[in-house]
Image (cartoon, helix red, strand yellow):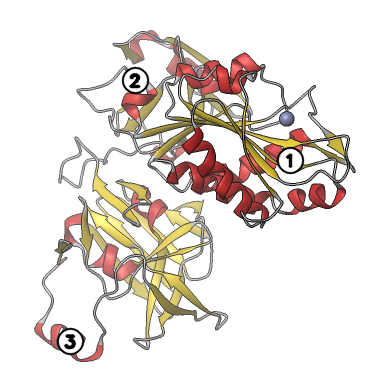
Amino acid sequence: MIKKRIFCLGLSLALLFSSIITTPAAIKAGSYFKIQYTHNKKTYSKKAIDARYNNKIIKTNMPGFIDGSTSLYSAYWVFGRCSSLGTKYSYSGKKNRVTLKRGSNTIVMTLNSKTATLNGKKFTLPAAPRKIRYVAKKKNYIMVPGDIVAKKLGLNYSWNNRLLSGLISKKSGSSNNSSQTPATPPASTGSYTKITASESNYSIRIKKPSGLNASSITSNDDYWNKRMQIIINGDYRSHFSSAANRTIRESLTYSVSYSGGKTYINLKTSSIKGFSIVQTSSYIYVKYAAPKSMFHRVIVVDAGHGGKDSGATGFGYAEKNMTLSIVQSMKASFDKNNTYKVYYTRLSDWYPSLSYRYKMANEVNADRFLSVHINSADNKSAKGTETLYKTYKTYAQTIQNSALTGMGYTSSSSYNRKLKYRDDLAVLNGPKMTTALVEMGFISNQTEASRINSRTTTIGANLYQAICNSF
Ligand SMILES: [Zn+2]
């Protein structure tokens, strides 16, 4: 397949010739290349990732890569040379300072520091900008975190794991007129939405008080309480309580509260909804829809037990804590993948009833459900991993394979307890979608209990992969 590439800005002839002579062909996303962090001289092999503007790959001499959980891109090649983005790049080697401008927004970053400023106001970057050596090219590039930089500059950014690309686009409804503040979404807790709130398509429009900075507004998808919260730094109760400052087109219950120096706008709906939130200089636009029409894939992940219900216990471990750690690790992976919207039955130590768990899955009409458990037996030598299923054997097998990998067991070993048919379990009977329950291992077996406890991150990453692979 031939990939379309856009050539951002005309290359000067001299540069074109020099790049023909000195640089290897651009590497494809997914292939590995060697880099060196210049601040500590550490060398790594990294998987190349792309940045795309309007779905076309932005051509660069320096591929992006992932540092921890942050996508880093060449500030010059992605934000400096791609004129379509409307961004301007400058770098001061003396001050180690990177400046990016778009319209009225200016970001100033310092190499090796997570502290940056947007229009003079400090904010924290998820990863420090770095000077990185592309070993094969013997050249250094200034790399910056793509997601936050794009968003702070008023662009849309989302990660697409299939394309190994950060997708950058302009906000709908924002014009090229740089004197207008471009629409920006509040720091998002959700995934890439199929429907985007706009001036013409919204469920509720809320007028902003004048002078309120876009970055003072964030959101929190509190689906456990069937509500979206818009959170504003400062006390704006009187402004947001005034009915004159909102237009509701699609039914919801609107309320305003204040705590810890923040104003909360609570948008309560009759059932769990997916939300898109976009703000312009004057308004916050919120659109809600059924999760399935809002998101590409909807998943429900259930950490077994919780709160008053410890589940099985042994050797100082409790099943409820282990399942939660595993699910937290799954969340860390899902959070990096915008294709999926994941609802978690719990992300803390409380007890959702069994019916709460599968009702949540049915309410959001999920594509997949997975319940995570740890086994226990009177026989202290019982060991191994099994997956319980009722109808969806193929899915259960996918989960079982990854669960074994996560535990570090081979499928041919006696640790593979394989699939078990069960027709008496609420989380297999209740969900109206593809569902399975995995028992990672035995808490009653001391070796296995400590093995699970030390591998929750790996287990979570593998279960995440299993769910992705099941599509
Ligand atoms: Zn259990």
Q: Quadrant of the N terminus?
A: bottom left
- Percent x, y for residue 171? 24, 40
Quadrant of the image where one finds ligand 1: top right
Horizontal and vertical percent for residue 12? 11, 80
Query: Where does label 2 land, which residue?
Result: 289
Question: Callout 3: helix, strand or loop?
Answer: helix
Q: Position of residue 370 (x, y in %)?
A: 56, 33
**What kind of element bears circle 1?**
helix
Q: Is residue 265 above or below residue 18?
A: above
Numbered label tally: 3
Residue at the disc numbered 3:
20
Circle 2: residue type: Ala
Give the spatial CA distance, label 2 vs label 1: 34 Å
The kind of residue tagged 1 is Met
Which quadrant of the structure image shows residue 39? bottom right
- Can residue 257 be seen at all in this image of the molecule? no
Left or right side of 3 for 398: right
User: Which residue position holds label 1?
Assistant: 322
Q: Earlier in the sequence, mark 3 or mark 1?
A: 3
